[in-house]
Image (tube, coloured by chain):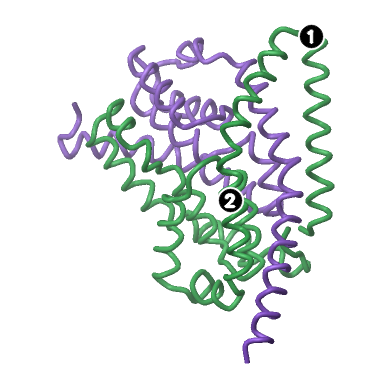
Chain colours: A green, B purple
């Protein structure tokens, strides 16, 4: 997906959502105002993480050369690639949307589809929220669940890679955002 | 020879900044759209009545759990609190596990953003796979706990 088509698509998407708000406002103004308040609160919580992701993107653009990405996250990265993707997914904090941009960039530099999937799947494990999850459901449950999540991410990644193909957009000449 | 290196670094910094700004500009309308959509969905689908959706049958509950978690969006902490509340109301651990996993792994609200940034096929297949895996892990987790005598 090229930068301009992504921007155009994003603007159309935003326009569609605004249209939805317009319809919702006509039907139920009070709830729509509450939804706007809720969205503003969500966005303010998102801003610091967005700043962090933009910083990470800047340094990734500066330092991560396609050759490094191909070697460590590419088709022949081996165990190191899987471990990096699992650790990256677990450690990546905040909402997922900003991370899509980084993955899009890494994909264009040669990141394996399976590892992108593993990264996203392991985001289900939220280390900072671990004490709360244990408090709600118990330590044994959390350990079993996390073990399954990590293990399942590997065949899921491989299967997804088979379904989608190694690098689906590269053949069409797509570029990063 | 320091001069060419400094020039090289400056041009790389400028190129990196330009590329990052372009990426951020593409990201922003998508991000605002997803946040607005999340706010609207959270307001229109109140969580309190969710326990009534579950029919008390494990397989069907797991399916409903994945659907509910996939449509819902927001901070994972909300899913823990909701999951805890659902358990208290007698919903099965299988359904709650399915709900917790799909809340973070299946993203129907985020799907347009994911498709805009990663192409169409990858997000579609990924979400479908996560949907199936959430049901599978939801069944396996309590089963493993039972077999290992870890069930409280």
User: Viewed as shown, does residue A9 lie left or right of B132?
Assistant: right
Q: Is residue B61 above or below residue A152?
A: above
Q: Residue at x 70, y 28 (%)?
A: B36
Alpha carbon separation for disc pair 1 and 2: 37 Å
Q: Which residue is mark 2?
A: A53
The crowding category of the residue bearing disc 2, from other C-alpha atoms within 10 Å (few below 14, some 14 to 19, many at least 20), is: many
The residue mark sitting in front, 1 or 2, is: 2
Indicate left or right for A48 with B27 as reference. Answer: left
Q: Quadrant of the C terminus of chain B?
A: top left
Host chain of mark 1: A
Position in image of residue A82 (x %, y %): 43, 64
Which chain does the numbered disc 2 sit on? A
Instruction: Give the structural element (helix, strand or loop) at label 2.
Output: helix
Q: How many neighbours does mark 1 have within 10 angstroms: few (below 14), some (14-19), or many (20 or more)?
A: few
Sequence order check, earlier mark of 1 and 2: 1
Q: Left or right: where does residue A172 sit relative to residue B76?
A: right
Residue B82 in the image, given as x and y percentages of width and height: 43, 20
State the residue position of label 1. A27
Q: From the viewer's side, name the closer residue of B132 and B127.
A: B127
């Amino acid at each position: 997906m090229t930068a301009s088509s992504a921007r155009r698509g994003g603007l159309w998407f935003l326009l569609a959502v605004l249209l939805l708000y317009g319809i919702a406002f006509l039907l139920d103004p009070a709830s729509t105002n509450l939804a706007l308040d809720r969205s503003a609160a969500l966005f303010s919580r998102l801003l610091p993480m967005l700043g962090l992701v933009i910083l990470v993107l800047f340094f990734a653009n500066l330092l991560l050369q396609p050759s490094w990405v191909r070697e460590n996250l590419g088709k022949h990265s081996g165990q190191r690639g899987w471990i990096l993707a699992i650790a990256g997914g677990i450690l990546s904090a905040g909402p997922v949307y900003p991370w899509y941009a980084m993955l899009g960039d890494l994909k264009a530099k040669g990141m394996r589809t399976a590892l992108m999937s593993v990264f996203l799947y392991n985001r289900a494990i939220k280390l900072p929220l671990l004490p709360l999850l244990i408090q709600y459901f118990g330590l044994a449950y959390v350990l079993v669940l996390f073990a399954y999540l990590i293990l399942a991410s590997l065949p899921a990644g491989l299967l997804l890679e088979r379904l989608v193909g190694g690098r689906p957009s590269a053949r069409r000449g797509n570029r990063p955002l | 020879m320091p001069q060419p290196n400094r020039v090289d670094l400056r041009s790389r910094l400028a190129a990196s900044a330009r590329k990052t700004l372009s990426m951020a500009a593409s990201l922003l309308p998508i991000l605002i759209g997803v946040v607005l959509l999340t706010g609207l969905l959270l307001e229109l689908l109140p969580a309190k009545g969710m326990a009534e959706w579950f029919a008390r049958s494990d397989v069907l509950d797991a399916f409903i759990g994945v659907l509910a978690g996939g449509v819902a969006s927001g901070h994972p902490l909300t899913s823990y609190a909701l999951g805890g509340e659902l358990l208290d109301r007698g919903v099965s651990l299988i359904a709650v596990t399915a709900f917790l996993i799909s809340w973070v792994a299946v993203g129907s609200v985020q799907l347009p953003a994911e498709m805009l940034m990663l192409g169409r096929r990858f997000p579609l297949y990924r979400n479908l796979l996560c949907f199936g895996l959430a049901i599978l892990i939801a069944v396996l987790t309590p089963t493993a706990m039972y077999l290992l005598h870890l069930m409280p």
